[in-house]
C-alpha cells in the first residue's frame, strides 16, 4: 500500500526536490508552503508521516507540531537549519519523532523516513497481545495506549519506549539500550535525546510527572518500568 507523506516547506526548490525523490521511492507526497495550508492538508489527508520545516510563514513548524500532538500521533520529522543541541531538543519536546539538520542528503532523508515509519508500524515486534500494567493498557496491534480507559496519544517513539519498558517490568535499561532498541542504530550519537522522549512520555502517562510511578529513573544507570503489575 502506498504511504502518504505531507511535506511543508516554504522553499519551492526543496519542496520539488524532496517530493520528486520520495515519489520515485513510491511514496505519495503532498506539499504546502505555509503553516495554515499544511494543517488543512494534514487534516484532510490523514497522512502516514509529516515532514515539517522549522521556519514557516503563518504558523511555524514547532507550533504545528504542538497543535498536531493535541489530537494526533502521526509521525513527525522536523527539518531545521538550527544545529544547536538545544534547538533539536526543543523540537523533540514539542512532539517530533526525529529531526534532520539542513543541508541534508536525500539519501539520509529517505533513511530517516523509512526508520520512523517502521517504528510507527511496530517494526518486527512479535508480541501482539495487549499488555496490562496497573492502570495502563498497551495494544501493540493498534499502537494504542489507555490509562483508566482513557486513550493516551503517544508518538511512535514514545510508544516504543513504553512498550519496551513495560514488557519487562523492573528491568533497568540504559539510555544507550533504549536508544538502540526504540529508535535504531543510526541514532547512537543522540543518546541524550532519550531523556526528552521519556520526559514527554511521563507527561502523558503519569499522574505526577515529577514523581513518576511507571517510568522510573534509576540514577546513574537509566530507566525502568515500575508501579503495580
Image (tube, rainbow, N blue to C red):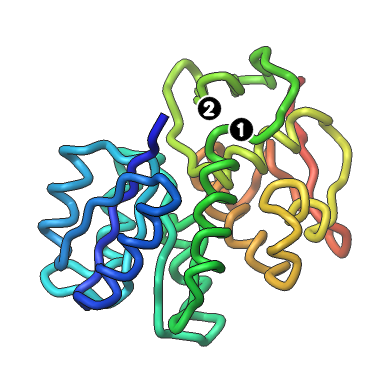
- Location of the N terminus by quadrant is top left
- Residue under the image location 69 percent in, 42 percent down: 215
Task: Answer above or below: position of 186 versus 132.
Answer: below
Task: Answer above or below: position of 80 versus 201.
Answer: below
* Residue 218 appears in view: no
Question: Which label belongs to residue 111?
Answer: none
Task: Answer above or below: position of 60 versus 42.
Answer: below
- Circle count: 2
Check disc 1 and report the residue beneath it.
Answer: 122
Q: Indicate the secondary structure of the residue bearing disc 2.
A: loop
- Residue under the image location 35 percent in, 66 percent down: 18
Q: Is residue 108 left or right of residue 78?
A: right
88 or 49: nearer the viewer: 49
Q: Indicate the secondary structure of the residue bearing disc 1.
A: loop
11 or 167: nearer the viewer: 11
- Decide: marks 1, 2 in contact (CB < 8 A)? yes
Check disc 2 and report the residue beneath it.
Answer: 143
Q: Pinpoint residue 49: horizontal percent, then vertical percent.
A: 39, 47
Q: Pinpoint residue 178: horizontal percent, then vertical percent.
A: 76, 51
Alpha carbon separation for disc pair 1 and 2: 7 Å
Residue situated furthest top in the rendering = 129
Q: Is residue 7 left or right of residue 192?
A: left
- Residue under the image location 16 percent in, 67 percent down: 33
Report the mark closest to the observer, 1 or 2: 1
- Residue under the image location 82 percent in, 31 percent down: 169
Q: Is residue 56 left or right of residue 68?
A: left
Badge 1: residue crowd in 10 Å (few <14, some 14–19, many ≥20): some
Mark positioned earlier in the residue sequence (1 or 2): 1
- Location of the C terminus by quadrant is top right
The answer to which image quadrant residue 16 occupies is bottom left
Task: Answer above or below: position of 84 versus 91.
Answer: below
* Residue 192 appears in view: yes
Amino acid at each position: 500500500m502506498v504511504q502518504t507523506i505531507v511535506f511543508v516547506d516554504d522553499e519551492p526548490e526543496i519542496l520539488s526536490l524532496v517530493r520528486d525523490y520520495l515519489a520515485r521511492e513510491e511514496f505519495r507526497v503532498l506539499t504546502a508552503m505555509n503553516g495554515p495550508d499544511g494543517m488543512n492538508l494534514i487534516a484532510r489527508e490523514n497522512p502516514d508521516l509529516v515532514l515539517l520545516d522549522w521556519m514557516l510563514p503563518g504558523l511555524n513548524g514547532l507550533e504545528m507540531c504542538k497543535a498536531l500532538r493535541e489530537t494526533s500521533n502521526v509521525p513527525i520529522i522536523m527539518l531545521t537549519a538550527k544545529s544547536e543541541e538545544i534547538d533539536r531538543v526543543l523540537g523533540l519536546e514539542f512532539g517530533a519523532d526525529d529531526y534532520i539538520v539542513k543541508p541534508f542528503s536525500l539519501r539520509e532523508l529517505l533513511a530517516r523516513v523509512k526508520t520512523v515509519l517502521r517504528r510507527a508500524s511496530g517494526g518486527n515486534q512479535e508480541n501482539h497481545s495487549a499488555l496490562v500494567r496497573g492502570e495502563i493498557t498497551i495494544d501493540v496491534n493498534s499502537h494504542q495506549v489507555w490509562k483508566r480507559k482513557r486513550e493516551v496519544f503517544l508518538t511512535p517513539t514514545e510508544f516504543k519506549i513504553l512498550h519496551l519498558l513495560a514488557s519487562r517490568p523492573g528491568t533497568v535499561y540504559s539510555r544507550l539500550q533504549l536508544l538502540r532498541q526504540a529508535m535504531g542504530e543510526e541514532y547512537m550519537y543522540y543518546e541524550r535525546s532519550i531523556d526528552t522522549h521519556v520526559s514527554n512520555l511521563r507527561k502523558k502517562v503519569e499522574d505526577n510527572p515529577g514523581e513518576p510511578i511507571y517510568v522510573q529513573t534509576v540514577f546513574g544507570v537509566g530507566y525502568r518500568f515500575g508501579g503495580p503489575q
